[in-house]
Amino acid sequence: MPKKTLIISGIITIIAPMFGMTGTVIGMLQAFGTLGQPGVANMNGLSAAISGVLVSTVAGLVIGGVSFIVFIVTLVCWLLNRKLSSSASTPKQFAEKKDNPTIQNST
């Protein structure tokens, strides 16, 4: 389960900002495309269009940021769990490992 979460959150972390930037670029092309038409010089409309397309950038960055946090937390938990499961969990097990050189760590 943690490996699957790591893979999915890692992919979302990479892809979400790209989708946000793609939406922004497409929106900017449309906004400036209307500005380039003859007889159209409405700066209020242009600024409203630009502020509207930046929403996709913010959405992509927020989703990517949250996914990155999930990725890091999952990775740390997985590494800690792996480390704890490979070490002795009770003093008796620790003593048995220490006294018996044939028992080796399986990490």
Image (cartoon, rainbow, N blue to C red):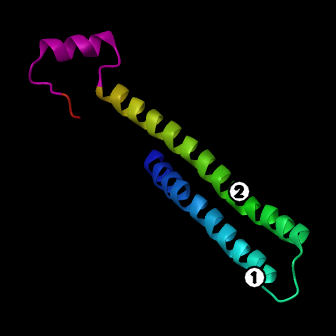
Amino acid on which disc 2 is placed? Ala
Tell me the tag on residue 22: none
Residue 9 percent coordinates (x, y): 53, 52
Q: Secondary structure at mark 1?
A: helix
Where 86 falls versus 24 (above or below)?
A: above
Q: Which residue is mark 1?
A: 33
Q: Residues within 10 Å of mark 1 (few under 14, many from 20)?
A: few
On the picture, is 37 further left or further right than 84?
Answer: right
Q: Secondary structure at mark 2?
A: helix
On the picture, is 35 further left or further right than 89?
Answer: right
* Residue found 83% across the figure and 89% down from its top: 38
Earlier along the polypeptide chain: callout 2 or callout 1?
Answer: 1
Camera-side mark, 2 or 1:
1
Task: Tell me the quarter of the picture where residue 59 sits.
Answer: bottom right
How many numbered dots are placed on residues in this image? 2
Where 87 falls versus 63 (above or below)?
A: above
Where 62 falls versus 24 (above or below)?
A: above
Q: Which residue is mark 2?
A: 59
* Residue found 81% across the figure and 87% down from its top: 37
* Residue found 41% across the figure and 29% down from its top: 80
Residue 84 percent coordinates (x, y): 36, 26
Residue 76 percent coordinates (x, y): 45, 34
Q: Residues within 10 Å of mark 2 (few under 14, many from 20)?
A: some
Bounds of the magenta span?
Answer: 87-104
